[in-house]
Amino acid sequence: MRHVDAELINAIKSAGCFDLSLGLESGSQRILDSIHKGFKIEQAIKAVKTIKDNSDISVSGLFILGLPGETHQDIMATIKFACSLPIDFAQFSIFTPYPGSPLFDKLVANGELDTGIRPNGRVDTSVWTRYAQYIMFKDVDPIWTPEGMTPSQLRSYQKRAMRSFYLRPRQILRQVKRLRYDNFWKVLRIIRRGFY
């Protein structure tokens, strides 16, 4: 985010770039700092504005709901942040602590996450089956939820985020203007994920 400027955008557009996905993650600076994103919310806002002011590149914002330490207020701030940006698409994923990641290791060390490895050395495959089902977008509970939040609440926030972002009149108009055959199917997939 810190390095996005008109020169960079013109260069990537000249190289044929037509779509950028930005890992914006959260609308809470406290959460961004806790996951070491390395940018300020103001820098993200400026980066998106720079892209939109200097090109017709489509911008997708990628957000994560349910990060460690996140509160209900943080999630609402993320939804509000996403809706305030002039981005074309938004993806709201539920945090999944993957093995090998620093957050996975931290949650295991704190006793907040079951690795599936039992004292006898055997692996409880039901723990890992949940990861596989989650990857395939099955209707399963999140692998982990922040303290004070239930899996059901987290899924509800995800649906609320999708509805809040995609059902705004400005967003609907933006998508209708951009609608081409290939975008039509992308929009339908996004809407289906958010409402079912």
Image (cartoon, grey):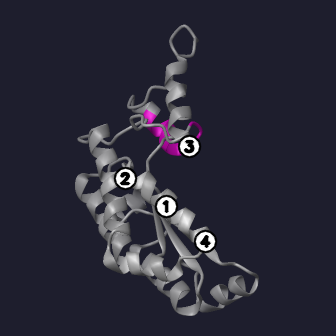
Residue 34 drawn above or below residue 121: below
Tell us which disc is closer to us: 4 or 3. Answer: 4
Mark number displayed over residue 195: 2
First-in-chain label (1 vs 4): 4
Q: Nearer the viewer, residue 186 or 5?
A: 186
Q: Nearer the viewer, mark 4 or mark 2?
A: 4
Mark found first going from the N terminus, 1 or 3: 3
- Count of numbered badges drawn on the protein: 4
User: Given the image, on which type of amino acid does mark 3 rest?
Assistant: Ser
Based on the displayed image, in which of its 4 quarters is residue 27 positioned?
A: bottom left
Check if residue 104 falls in the magenta segment: yes
Q: Is mark 2 on a helix, strand or loop?
A: helix
Q: Distance between the residues labelled 2 and 1?
A: 11 Å
Amino acid of disc 1: Leu
Asked if residue 44 lies left or right of residue 18, the reply is: left
Report the Cα–Cα distance between label 4 and label 2: 22 Å
Which residue lies under the disc numbered 4?
A: 181
* Residue situated in front as seen by the camera: 172 or 165: 172
Q: Earlier in the sequence, mark 2 or mark 1?
A: 1
Residue stretch rendered in magenta on the structure: 99-107
- In the image, 123 versus 163, the foreground residue is 163
- Classify mark 3: helix, strand or loop: loop
Mark 3 vs mark 2: give the one in front: 2
Mark 1 lies on a secondary structure that is helix
Residue that carries the numbered disc 1 in the rendered image: 188
Residue located beneath label 3 in the image? 101
